[in-house]
Image (cartoon, grey):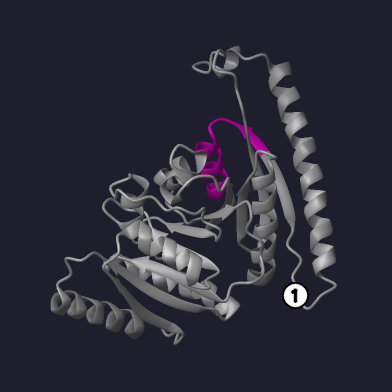
Amino acid sequence: MKTIIVPTDFTARADNAARYAIGIAREMKRDVKLCHALFVPIELPMADPGLWPLEDYAFLKDAAAKQLESLAVELEDTIDDAAKGPASPHKPAISFDNEIGPVTDVVVNFMDDENSSLVVMGISGTGGFGRLIMGSKSKDLVDKADFPVLLIPVSAVFKGIKTIIFATDLSEGDIDVIKSIAGMAKVFKAEIRVYHITGEKYERNVKRNQADTFMEKLTGEEHYSNISYHHFRGMNINDGLEWLCEHGQIDLLAMVHRPHSLLYRVLTGCHTHHMARHIKIPLLVFPPDYNMSL
């Protein structure tokens, strides 16, 4: 059984992401592993971990393990409460561990150990869409990950997934990513809306042909009928994404993080307008040309 990895620093946003991950795990019949990256003061000689006193390392490991165990018990109580309702009967097993090192390295190690296909991670929800991820541990993980990362705003509450929006620039590699998303959509019986956002300089015939080819190839290879195509013209990327998040009645926004992709341009600030409101829906970020099932 696949396992969802949930990094935690024991903050409110991390606890909320863990609860969201439990909701997904119940529906997708997955287990959950909580992981914590132990912080090491910068003055310690990390060039030679052997110089770090073993008793200090053991103390930090033990303290983190106790916090992880407490969180796991709290989450298990949440599962038991949910089981009283009409939700999925699956009860995710919750395990936990901690290691010393940067968050990204620790998460990647746990992903390899558990043969996992998804990380669920909390974000603070402060600032515009680009500023939300820039400068955070989330961005470092997104930059280096070869697996999907689901970023959960602190205000997001899992209520199922009915509508998924995938923002695309019609790159051919996005087709494999959408096929991966379709696996999740089937579990939740969710609609997938493929959105292409373009500026004023839009070559209608060329792009329309490109979009037709993109969708024909997608629907020819992916036998999931609840997929539709939509086009936003005359909006920059930030404005288009903000409008979708505020008015699209969606549960999940999915994007690919590659050089010159939509998400890359948002994160690197290539657009002059910033989103005015905080993102309030989960953001599922894929590495380029991802083609594995979630």
Say if 257 sits above or below 79 in the image: above
- Left or right of residue 139, residue 197 in this image: left
Q: Which residues are magenta?
A: 98-112
Residue 23 quadrant: bottom right
Residue 251 quadrant: bottom right
- Left or right of residue 250, residue 13 in this image: right
**Of 21 and 133, the residue lying toward us:** 133
Q: Looking at the picture, which amino acid does disc 1 mark? A: Ala
Q: Residue at x 43, y 65 (%)?
A: 243
**Of 190 and 291, the residue lying toward us:** 190
- Left or right of residue 154, residue 220 in this image: left
Residue 30: % across, % down: 65, 64
Badge 1 local density, few (<14 within 10 Å), some, or many (20+)?
few
**Of 189 and 273, the residue lying toward us:** 273
Q: Secondary structure at mark 1?
A: loop
Say if 213 sits above or below 284 in the image: below
Q: Is residue 104 magenta?
A: yes
Q: Residue at x 35, y 80 (%)?
A: 229
Q: Main secondary structure of the magenta part?
A: helix
Q: Is residue 99 magenta?
A: yes
Residue 135 shows in this picture: yes
Q: Which residue is mark 1?
A: 87
Say if 9 sits above or below 57 in the image: below
